[in-house]
Amino acid sequence: MIVLGIETSCDETAASVCSNRKILSNIVSSQYIHNNYGGVIPELASREHEKYLNLIVNTAINKSGIKLSSLEAIAVTQGPGLAGTLLTGISFAKGLSLSLNIPIVAINHLDGKREIKVTANLIDPNQSASDAVFGIQQSIIPIIEEKYPTIETSFEGQYREANKTIQSSKVVFPLALFLIFCVIGFTFRTYSQPILLLLLIPFSLTTVAWGHLVHGFPVNVISLLGVIALVGILVNDGLVLISKFNSNLRSGKSYDESLFGAGKERFRAIFLTSITTMAGLAPIIFEKSFQAQLLKPMAISIAYGIGYATFLTLILLPILLSLTNSLKLNFVWLRSGIKLEKRDVEAPVIEINREKK
């Protein structure tokens, strides 16, 4: 097969004629007009290509010793490169291919190597792109690499963006948790209560997984973004309860009265916050349109997670507070031999006693 190659991606106009993988001619023209500007000017490059491309193609054909009518295909660079200069070469190649009634082949490059791009869309919106790519990696790519050892594969698109998000979340998510811990610790002047709030997060993740299973969705990157939002809502509910608990202790109530009173007085606020959030996300979860499928994993993560987090805040958090209080009492007793009241080892009461001294 005799193929004419055209290259106009930047500041060099080139044409080459190949026959059965043998180069018959190769003509390259560099544009020195850009030397006066310290870099390539796209508009000037496009004009230079238009001026010399026809001459360079004719020179390459004449040097190859074949006739123009003998060409069987035209290959032209499609990318990467300057948009204007690429368009010049592609337009010339299209016109020549139409006049000769021969096919045109778009050539792409990546890091100086020939690139063949394969794209696909998921037929089933409930299927995970990561699972599809994993299946290709396990069953198809090994066969191709065995047949063509020099081939290198790279997975882009949604798969690449998902990996980028996961890699960035490995840094951002722990940092966010650390900042939450610091803010709560400085606000309440204690480190035990922030730790208890953060301990609720793993428990709420169980219902996130169950929610995806119920609706038939795989856990993906969008689900992870929903988990991040869930953490904020969960911490906010816990802050409401702990803030009231500390306030009751400052008012002079006993430990048990403060804890039970905080649960009773903040039940409505925590419960209504969770219910309204779940109700607001319900239309997205049960929406059947294709556009809603992208947001469904995030909505499922938040709705199911916050539903379970409500019970965690109202039941598990008070239990953890009581358990921590018992540990504090036993630690003080072992260290000093003094048996204190439950409220005396809590940060708000300790702060009040220090101010009195």
Image (spheres, helix red, strand yellow):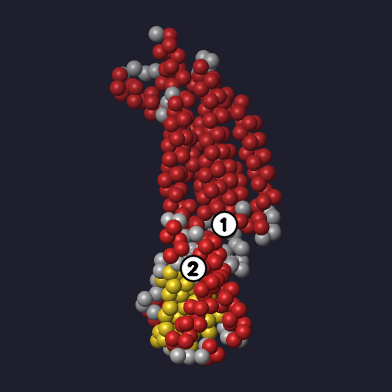
Q: Nearer the viewer, residue 56 or 244?
A: 56
Which residue has dot 1 on it? 213
* Alpha-carbon span between mark 2 and mark 1: 49 Å
- Residue at position x 48%, y 91% from top? 66
Can you say whether 155 is above or below 304 in the image? Answer: below
Q: Position of residue 227 (x, y in %)?
A: 53, 46
Q: How many marks?
A: 2
The residue tagged with tag 2: helix, strand or loop?
A: loop
Q: Quadrant of residue 341?
A: top left
Which amino acid lies under the numbered mark 2 shown in the image of this protein? Ser
Can you say whether 327 is above or below 352 in the image? Answer: below
Which amino acid lies under the numbered mark 1 shown in the image of this protein? Leu
The residue tagged with tag 1: helix, strand or loop?
A: helix
Q: Nearer the viewer, residue 145 or 301?
A: 145
Relative to 286, 352 lies left or right: left
Q: Is residue 4 visible?
A: no
Q: Is residue 29 visible?
A: yes
Q: Which callout, 2 or 1, points to the residue nearer the camera?
A: 2
Q: Earlier in the sequence, mark 2 or mark 1?
A: 2
- Residue at position x 54%, y 58% from top? 218
Q: Position of residue 130 (x, y in %)?
A: 50, 62
Q: Position of residue 44 (x, y in %)?
A: 52, 62
Which residue has dot 2 on it? 9
Relative to 241, 190 lies left or right: left
Q: Nearer the viewer, residue 70 or 313?
A: 70
- Residue at position x 42%, y 83% from top? 25
Q: What label sits on residue 199 in the rendered view?
A: none
Location of the C terminus (image quadrant): top left
Q: Position of residue 213 (x, y in %)?
A: 57, 57
